[in-house]
Image (cartoon, rainbow, N blue to C red):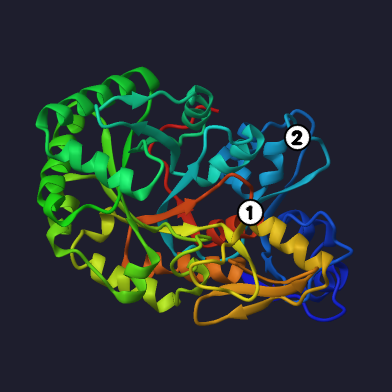
Amino acid sequence: MIIHIVGQGETIYSIASEYGKSADRLALENGITTADNLAIGEAMVILYPKIEYTVQVGDTLGSIARKYNTTIMEILRNNPYLSDREYIYPGELIVIEYEGQKIRAMSVTGYVYPFVNLKVLRKTLPFLTYLSVYSHYYNEKGEILHVDDSKLIQKAIRYGVAPIMVLNEMSASPEEVRGITHTILNNQALQNDLINNLINTLDRSGYYGVDFISPYILPADRPLYVEFIERLSSRLHLEGYKVFLSMTICIFEMVANIVYEDLQLERLGQCVDKVMFISYEGGYAFGISQGLIAYDTSNNRLNYVTGKINPEKTMFGISTIGYDWKLPYIGGVSKGQAISYNSAIELAREFNAEIKFDDVTKFSYFQYATNYDYVVRFKDARGIDAFVGLVPIHGINGVGLWNIMYFMAPMWLVINSQYEIEKVLPIRI
């Protein structure tokens, strides 16, 4: 895999010529639809096919997969545009395998809202191990709010992706979160009601398991929280369900290297199947922007975590969302506007902005001006490659991507070209 940074005057055609590739294929692989206007500093992923195949009359993806002793999922990962169509056509060239040695196998979790575009989901599912649907909510009575997620579950299962129900507190503020958590943790009857309601919901829905979001826990409640997670895991395991635990870390905690020993990560790691560590602050008016955290901060946090929890149970959350900030930045006042990678690139092209790369944070950024000055910070192929690279460095299970509501082509090129995507369910297509 090569990551090429677009220079002054370069076009999709000059770059394709430099690397001996078809311009159409290069644009297709990188999700580029306006090839006549690249941004200076834009990162493009260059891959070379090892095996290609020209579709013949009567071919299907299944027959081609059998011919080359591969899988339909691998063909879709190497040619994701095929997911946009119902048919393949004689004469078209598809990639069976790319050059390069894959580093290792890993799990990939994609977080998604129930209203995701199903075409985007279908294109993304070949790259996933788990689909975490955000979110079912529970209240202070242990009741669970129903979510219309049946289509997502069915489609995930067809692609061999295990659907995971994300469970979160029903609240409008951090204070309410702590209040609901405190009420549940200090009442075993409510805990039993919550667990029973959860099992009933899982039984009806077809989920593979639950991802229990762990918010900030009051110091006095932390021992109770550990006991509750142990009780929850024991009950769900008896019913045949997997239990994931998402430990949400605020940016201030990461930067200040704050850890809560009374959360007893060792005990939590022993009782659940996977633990996801994910930072949750981004464009808030208070605190520190996610795009300003040094890469080494995440690396150090994983060093600590893997000393407490089996790395094979550990996953690391990566945000696919960037933020557009109005300048000057004023702490406690400024608030970033969330922006996707695709929209960030379009914005840079529109304003002829030069994209630069911050090697400390591994984020890309650029400035542009309308009536005010703005700065956009986001992850491109370079940042994704760096953060996903923490998986083999620490020997952890894999990554969680927040979120997959849009298709970020360069990200999947980086992941698919270097890692085998694990599947835990049989594929039914």
Q: Which is nearer the eye, 389 or 164?
A: 164
Can residue 264 be seen?
A: no
Residue 182: x percent and y percent? 19, 43
Instruction: Please indicate, yes or no, whether residue 334 appears anywhere in the rendered image.
Output: yes
Snapshot quadrant of residue 86: top right
> Residue 113 at x, y = what percent?
52, 38
Residue nearer the viewer, 85 or 376: 376
Counting from the top left corner in percent of width and height, residue 382 is at 58, 71
The amino acid on which the numbered mark 1 sits, given as a three-letter code, is Met
Residue 12: give x, y in percent of width and height. 84, 67
Q: Is residue 319 left or right of residue 279?
A: right
Q: Nearer the viewer, mark 2 or mark 1?
A: 1
Q: Is residue 96 above or below residue 304?
A: above
* Circle 1 Cα neighbour tier, 10 Å, few/some/many (<14 / 14–19 / ≥20): some
For the point 51% across and 33% down, the residue is: 159
**Kind of residue sitting beneath label 2:** Ile
77 left or right of 428? right
On residue 88, the disc is 2
Give above or below for 263 relative to 37. Answer: above
Q: Give the SS element for disc 1.
A: loop
**Which label number is shown at residue 408?**
1
Which mark sits nearer the N-terminus, 2 or 1?
A: 2
Spatial distance from mark 2 to mark 1, Cα to Cα? 23 Å
